[in-house]
Structures are given as structure tokens and as C-alpha cells.
Amino acid sequence: MLDAGLSRRGLFAAGAALAASFATAGCGVANGNSSDRILEPPRGSATPARLPLSTVNPDAVAAKYAGQGPKAWGTDIDGILTGFNAAGKQFAITFDACGGPGNNDIDENLLAFLQAQQIPATLFLNKRWIDANPARAGQLAANPLFEIGNHGTAHCPLSVTGRAAYEIKGTANAAAAVDEVWGNHQRITALTGHAPRFFRAGTAHYDDVAVAIVKELGETPVGYSVNADFGATASSNQVQSNMMAAKPGGISLAHMHRPKSGTGAGMLAALPALKANGFQFVHLP
């Protein structure tokens, strides 16, 4: 429980201000996590529009949903964005950076390929990954080719009952679900200067009450239509095959924090082939 007089919003605001001061002070990339090469924004690229800072009261959201019981659970229940109305053969690519022990690395070859090919992507960054890689996160956020999405504070499935997915325990109640979203919402706002538009839960699992909470906090809960790399466990051939099943208006899920996995090689093979088949890669709408 929070101390009397110290709201959840105030606590996270203070944390965000401290995080912003760390980024401004130029804290380095965590040792061994990534190279020092900077990904520069493409020349002549327009600066992405800045969204207003959030005026949401997270304590009020937690109170509103306290004690509500969920009726649905999964990765594609109502309210989760798993596709969009495409103009032609448009497709949205997303990559998660899950953060935490063993998950704070970055696939530089993959990101360099996206930049060289001018392929936009939404990067869902977990707060632990940002805190381990503040300089790199700032560089990615400054590149208009990439949009930064919220991948949670501790990478938990988003639940109001503690329900687990893949043996990862979910958030225990409405207040914990709010904290899982809001802690990184504030961190990304401090990093980028504007509130994130999109949230993907750890494991991409939600219950219906948690979906409503995400929306109340001003973000859109995101899932996927193509699970490209099965949590960065798929071989490069599997990743390529999964991506080649893409349909217009779809959203792919893959991971950018495991450079030794098959994800990068599979994506480097699949994306040019999809492009040759007439696909256009776009940011989430």
C-alpha cells in the first residue's frame, strides 16, 4: 500500500522525473547489452507529432475497477487490437524488448536492417529494458522510423486476479494492473516527451477488466495476428515461414532483445520477400 498522502500518480511522476534526469545526464548503455553505434534518424524525415501529456488519474482508475471479476482471458479477446483496416496490402511490424535478467540485449543487425530498408516498426519496450539501456532507448525514440510502445513495468500478463501465462504470474488486482501500465507509461513519457499510444502486456495476455483499464489509462491494448518467433524461441526458418503467412491489415509479434535467436535472420529473409509481394509496412494506426 502507498503511504497516506502519496498517490500512485505522484509516486510515478517522481520516478519519471528522476528517470528523465538520468537520461539527460547521459547515462550509458548497460555493459554488454549493445554496441555504441547510434541509429540516426533518416535525413529529411519529419518529426513525429507530439501527443499531449496525460491527465489521467491512475488512482481513480484503480478504484473504479477494484473488485471487478473478469469474464474473458487471452490474446485476442474483445478490445485488443489484433489487426486494422488496411489500405491495400498494409502490414504492421512490432518488436518487443522484454527486459530483465538475460533479456536486456538488442539485435543491432535487425534494427540496422529496418533502417536501411526504411521499414517502420512499433517497438514495445519494457521499463526494465529502458532502464538498462537508457541511451539506446533515447536514440530509438528519436528516430521517426520507430514508434515506442509500452510493454509494461515488470513484464506481467495483465490480470486482475493474478492469472498466469507461460508460468509468468499476472498482476494480482486492479491496482497492480494499473501500476504495470502506468509505471512504464510515465517512463516512456519522460523518455520521449509524449504519452505512448499503445500497450502490449507481458506474454500479450489480458483479461477483459485489464483491457478496460488500459483504455482508461489512455492507451490501446495490442495483440497480434502473426506470432512470428514464439517468444524468440523459433528458428530462422520458422520465423520466415510464419511471416510469409501475413495478411493485409495484420500485426506481427517478434522480439528484438535476443540477437542470437532466429528472429533477426528470419525477418531479414521474410521482409524483402513480403515487400516484393506488394506489402507496405506501416506503423500501428
Image: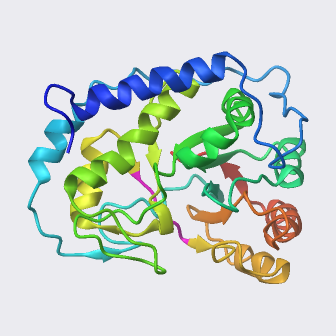
- In-front residue for pair 138/49: 138
Q: Which residues are magenta?
A: 221-225
Q: Is residue 196 visible?
A: yes
Left or right: 244, with 12 as reference point: right
Left or right: 32, with 167 as reference point: right
Q: Residue at x 83, y 62 (%)?
A: 259
In the image, is residue 96 above or below residue 183?
below
Q: Is residue 145 magenta?
A: no
In the image, is residue 178 above or below residue 271?
above
Q: Main secondary structure of the magenta part?
A: loop
Question: How far from the left and from the top, in percent, is residue 75?
Answer: 42, 72
In the image, is residue 68 above or below residue 16?
below
Question: How far from the left and from the top, in percent, is residue 87?
Answer: 58, 52
Left or right: 87, with 58 as reference point: right
Q: Is residue 223 visible?
A: no
Q: Residue at x 46, y 46 (%)?
A: 198
Quadrant of the image containing the N terminus: top left
Residue at the extreme front of the image, as rendered: 3
Q: Residue at x 68, y 29 (%)?
A: 138
- In-front residue for pair 168/41: 168
Q: Quadrant of residue 207?
A: bottom left
Q: Residue at x 83, y 71 (%)?
A: 266
- In-front residue for pair 209/47: 209
